[in-house]
Image: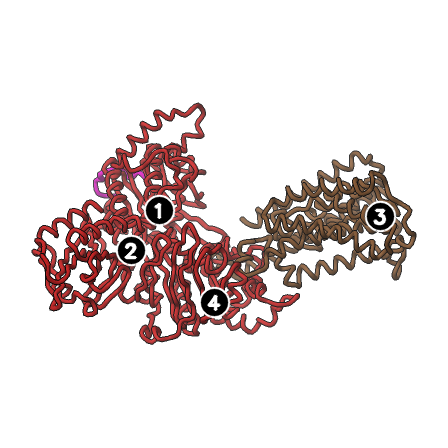
Chain colours: A red, B brown
Amino acid sequence: MSVAHDAAAAPDRSEPILVARGVDKTFDRTRALNGASLELRAGEVHGLLGANGAGKSTLSKVISGHVVRDAGEILYKGRPLNLRSTREALEAGIAIVMQETSLAPDLTVLENIFLPELRRPGLLSYGSMRRRAGELLGRLGHEHVLPLDQEVARLSAAQRQLVEIAKALALDADLIIFDEPTASLSPSEVERLFDIMAKLREDGCALIFVSHRLEEVFTITDRVTIMREGATVAASEPTASLGQADVIRHMVGRDIGALYATPGLQDAGSEAPVVFEVEGVATPPVVRNVSFAVRRGEILGLGGLVGAGRSETAEAIFGLRHRTAGTIRVDGREVSPRKPADAVRAGIGFVAEDRRFQSIVPDLSVKENLLLAHLGAHRGFGLGYRSRQAKIDELMEALGLPAERLLDANMLNFSGGMQQKIIIARWLLLEPKVLILDEPTKGVDIGTRQAIYEILRRIAEQDVAVVVISSDFEELLGISERVVVMSDGYSIADLPSAMLDEEKLTLLAAPRTSMARNTELLTRLAQECGGAGFWVLLDEDSLICLNSVVADRTADPGFAAGEARRLQDTRITAALAARAGEGQAAGFVEEPEGLATLLVPIRTRRGHDLGWIGLTLPQGGERPDAAQVKERIEALNAEAG
Amino acid sequence: MQKQVDEGGAGGGKGLGMRLLMRLEVRMLALALIIAVTLSFLSPYFLTQNNIFNILDQSVVIGIVAIGMTFVILTGGIDLSVGSVAGLSGIVLGLALKDYPIPVAILMAVGTGAFVGLVSGVLIGYFGLAAFVVTLGMMAIGRSLAYIFSGQTAISGFPSELSSIVYTTVLGIPTNVLFLGLAYLLAWGYLTHTKGGRTIYAVGSNKEAARAAGLNTLLYSILPYVVSGALAAVAITFSVAQILSVDPLTGNLMELDAIAAVVIGGASLYGGRGTIVGTLIGVLIMVMIRNGLNLLGVSPFWQGSAIGGIIIMALLVERLVRSRSES
């Protein structure tokens, strides 16, 4: 890339701290990295971008010593770096903060921060550890947030991440890799993480930020490197020089719009009968109360942050987890699967998230893997494989799989996409009424992803109720007609995809802990002023209500948390239509019926749009001063954020 | 390799897989032949018709037990209790022969073996206890009961008709050898051509995936232990019929030979890998070595070292082949 070249030629602010060139890595037969490169300077946040399966995580793990590369060269502080273990990486000053943290859940915060020291000989001084931990957390500006003696298992996702960062700092790491650190954080937690990253950057650390959330990348990074299919396609481009469209083009290699088959006939779908209904499902401690319904021929998305309980919900429905409450109906008939075999009999299929451990039987041939669900459903002593032959041929044809590949002895040699197709075919063979897919494109290359989207669309058209779980919000919105949002084990919203975008979905999916602060704000507002407080995202002609607290029933604005409404269908149409822009003096707007509403736009400190906070007051009565209320809202919001 | 990487192993996978499979079975057969040839040079008596019938005859007991052991090991388990179960069933057979007709007595013995296997299987499959520990416990219990039921002495004086299941021939083949062949044929058919057999492989290879696909993993985690217990009793019935006497120590260390035969036969102790044909070859190798060492006049005290060394060698070879095939 020319920009990278210029940067190298120009008098540098600093020498690169890390240079990786021509890195190759092959797992089984999947080529994860194919000549990847990366250059990193001290004192920068370097974005590492790419679609699922582009190799960004693998490259991170090569740098952090989790994965040993097959070929290529890595220079760290000017010297060749050949790591054989994560321990060597830590000793060299390279740390990684991963999505699934590497913390010991039964140890305390303090012990985890100093975990790498536990293997050193000699006695531990808890006193000095405690002092140093205080200093480290102070450096992060969080000295009072983390109880040092708390067991890590009882911390929130954001707190656990903080422990990981402190652990990296305890080792004097100069290079910290953040691998999808925001996947389980609420927007305000993300802000706080970015503050910490900015502080680390000032201290001269080099940070790698791995993500596929573009708006975050534009907020925090200085330069970006983009990967596609294991290779670096754009190296060290200054973030400021790129637009979103450029980044997407590099990531996908083509126009993104073509990736998803357009979900057509949205309105027709809403009249089809409900095939699959889940009501009040609970599996403590993760899933508390989840309900949703899928109509015939519909693809329903189950969205939420990592850790919201989506996979656990699916597993509970399928009989893989013990359910303590809830009813499940297929075609109106109640079913109560206690084990997967029961669910299969009821016409439910489930493509689990972890193919290697939940789906593939490595010692059986590909054909037997394909026929595994058949074997479970087959009544009789023999195999009954032949009875399915015609259907197999048809499926292989439809999925674009060469029939002779069925005879391959080992499915692990297949690419992720091929494996996933076989697993999907395993269920289609049984002609299920309901098919649930958990992260169906995880570890699947971009070409096959498209094929999988087409398959899902086609089976939905064949009247199968399809439920898709995905952490990739863009994918979720692209393939499903409707999205049910989950947060902390509750289903909290059920909205048509057409009304949503990634940012709205992120706000909706925020963990309840962060929502609790907002509820407190709204409660105080509603009670102090005697009306209804709400938090909404506004569009041209519709709104999504994220939260609402009604203290006075007569002031009900006509929508509740998790609901979407057309503006004209609310009770405060005039106020919503007359909403003031930013900086304008806000005032109460009165409806013809008498309700008075004040709307205040809110933003994070970084200027991230968070929608509007509103206060509706009942007819008549005294109106408080609008400017004062606005100030109050802004003050409360700053406190809550 | 480049091509295979790019196309996810198009064409290459099949050839390689087949070759591996071939290698596994061919390697074991080759080992058996090498041992046979070596022994025939070392001892002129080895290749005589008499001795060959001898080897087959000696294969019956361990061969039958090894079938059950193969079932268990395919699920990723182990059954250390087969020797004790054989002893206990043998004592039950001996006691029952005093009061009941032969077929009923045999059924009672086999029932005893199957029941002990069922208990182990439920503890392992339903309660999720470690197979090693459960069958270790059963091993102690079985032997203890054998002593108690027998009154700590040998039982003999059985009706001589019992020996007819060993000493009659059909078309020149002794009935016990014929039974062994039939048992292997049935086991092969079951493991390769029935729902149950394939489920046993799936359970051993990836139990989580098997369960998620709707297979009855509970039933097929338990069944192999029942089969193993029942076959241990069947095996000891042939042994008792031969010597018309049984003592509480009968079947001692039988588990060692059975596990060794299965492992030499190429089965993986992690489950999911192994064939009944391999086990048969493993049994023949074990018996030939024992037979040969006897012919050569090697002290029985050294024979343990020889057998132990072979087991470890077989495991080492499996590990080397496995890691090569996966890299």
- The question of residue A14 being in magenta is answered with yes
The residue mark sitting in front, 4 or 2, is 4
Marks 4 and 1 on same chain: yes
Q: What percent of the width, then of the height, locates residue A94?
A: 36, 37
Could you say which quadrant of the image residue A391 lies in?
Answer: bottom right
Does residue A307 appear in this view?
Answer: yes
The crowd level at tag 3 (other Cα within 10 Å; few <14, some 14-19, many 20+) is many
Residue bearing the label numbered 3: B94
Marks 4 and 3 on same chain: no
Q: Secondary structure at mark 4?
A: strand
Q: Do the CB atoms of the residues marked 1 and 3 lie less than 8 Å apart?
A: no
Q: CA–CA distance between discs 4 and 1?
A: 42 Å
What type of secondary structure mainly makes up the magenta span?
Answer: loop
Residue drawn 52% across and 60% down? A340
Q: Earlier in the sequence, mark 4 or mark 2?
A: 4
The crowd level at tag 4 (other Cα within 10 Å; few <14, some 14-19, many 20+) is some
Marks 1 and 3 on same chain: no
Q: Do the CB atoms of the residues marked 3 and 2 lie less than 8 Å apart?
A: no
Q: Do the CB atoms of the residues marked 4 and 3 lie less than 8 Å apart?
A: no
Q: What percent of the width, then of the height, locates residue A378?
A: 59, 67
